[in-house]
Each structure stands twice: as C-alpha cells, then as structure tokens.
Image (cartoon, rainbow, N blue to C red):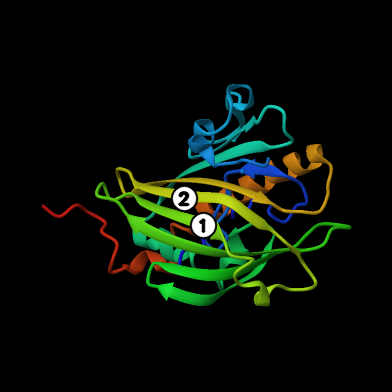
Amino acid sequence: MLKLFCHLYLLLNLSCRFICLGFLASPLLFFVPTVTLADDNIEKILPVNLQPLNWQLSKTSDTLSIEFRNIPHSDVIEIRAKALIESTLSGALLFLQDTKSISKWLHNSSKSKIIKNISATENISVTTFDAFWLFKNREMIIRSRYWQNDDLSVEVTINDESKNYSQYKSKETIQINIISAHWTIKKRSNGMIEIEHTVSAEPNGFIPNWLAIRIALKSMWKTLVNIENQLPSSGHQKQQLPNILEHINH
C-alpha cells in the first residue's frame, strides 16, 4: 500500500524536532511541538501567539517547490513540498508503495517492508533510515491508508503504529514517532499530476536545530528530484489499480 510518501520523511532520520512536508515513508510517507497538526490544520488548534508564520521559499524549479515556516515559541519548522510530474494516479500510488524500490527515491532510506496488509488500501509497514556521521539510524512503523475523492484526487494518511507493533522494533535504531502525515495527488492537464505532501514527526535523540533544518530541506529536495526523474518512466505507469479511476465516468 502506499507507503508514501515521510517520508518527505523528511528527515525522519535526523534527531531533532521539526514539522515537514515530505513523502510517506510507509513507502508512502514523508512530511509536524507538543500540539501539532500538519499544514493548515495546525492553525485550527494553536493559540494566536503560536500561529505559524508566513511561508518562506526554500528552493524551486519549474515543477518542484519547497517552502517552510517557523512555529512561534518552538523549535519546530513546517515544510511544504509540491511537485508537478507526468504520471497516472495509479502509477504514482504503485511507485510510492513499492517497498523494494523505496531506497532509490526516498532520500536516506535504506529499506522498507510491509508487515501487515489490512486491506487493498491500508497496511502497516516498517521503514529504516540511514543516519549520518555519529548518529544512530532511525526507524518508523506506520499505518498508511489511501482513498479517492469524487474529483479523482487521491489522499493518503499515515499514522504512527510503533506502540501497537513494538515487537517489530529494532534494538539498533532509534524509533521515529509520527505525529501527522498526509499526501494529496491531483490530476492535472496533459497527463500531469500534482503531488503535495505534509508530515510531522518526533525523530527523537538530539541534533542542533539549525543543522537539522538545513539537512531536512536538502533531503526533501533530493527526494522530489528523485521522484521527478524516476516516476514518469516507471514500469508502474503501465499498471492500473482497480479501485482508482483516471477519468470521471459520465
């Protein structure tokens, strides 16, 4: 199932607190202080003095963009990643949930596997991230579920399952706690789709905040570039999920 897209994961392999938009790393992840919700939902629960600041552009191209904003009175930043890519909806979902290939596009991920299939659209998975010098590897156990809306857009939610499936935890890694993660994939014209990902997590451990932010933004960008380069030519483009419509039936 969609392991989408933390993946934007963003750096779920780093040890610091942050909010980010990345890709489900269930293979569908990617990428939110104490009370946190991804993207616009956070504004509905935070007091006025804790409302996120305006978005700041980190990096952009004709088809990709990464923005971030600070959450006042916290060490957290929120990252929003968007990509405009040639693909079918089914092709994108199958690409993102392909556990055997996730390490090729999800930056810093080393392996991923599904440990339980709940339904055709929902599963539990474990993903491991390689840490850099002096830091331990990270691991997350998540539940990912996707559905399609009436307008053909596809959404994917990711929830932390580290407590419910603690028997799958590795003693050699630090557990990542997912707070909130979400993906949206929309059909655009001329065979294009728009991908937007949000995610929040507690990577746990410690690392200087300025370094974590810098690495998170760079890793998110590398993940977007990888998806842009690999998704259009993926063999999954020739496959069709039976529960996903590419066109509205009249």
Residue 11 left/right relative to 180: right
**Mark earlier in primary sequence (2, 1):** 1
Which label belongs to residue 158? 1
Q: Are marks 2 and 1 in contact (CB under 8 Å)?
A: yes
Q: What is the distance, in whole Å, between disc 2 and disc 1 at their CAs? A: 9 Å
Up-down: is 117 above or below 74? below
Identified by mark 1, the residue type is Ile
* x 72%, y 53%: residue: 203
- Give the crowd class for mark 1: few <14, some 14-19, many >=20 residues within 10 Å: many
Up-down: is 210 above or below 115? above
Res 160 quadrant in image? bottom right
* x 35%, y 58%: residue: 147
**Residue annotated with mark 2:** 183
**Total numbered labels:** 2
Question: Where does the image place residue 63, in percent across and percent down from the top left?
Answer: 48, 40
Res 88 quadrant in image? bottom left
* x 62%, y 45%: residue: 221
Up-down: is 136 above or below 188? below
Is residue 98 visible in this depiction of the protein? Answer: no
Identified by mark 2, the residue type is Trp
Question: Where does the image place residue 136, in percent across and percent down from the top left?
Answer: 82, 62
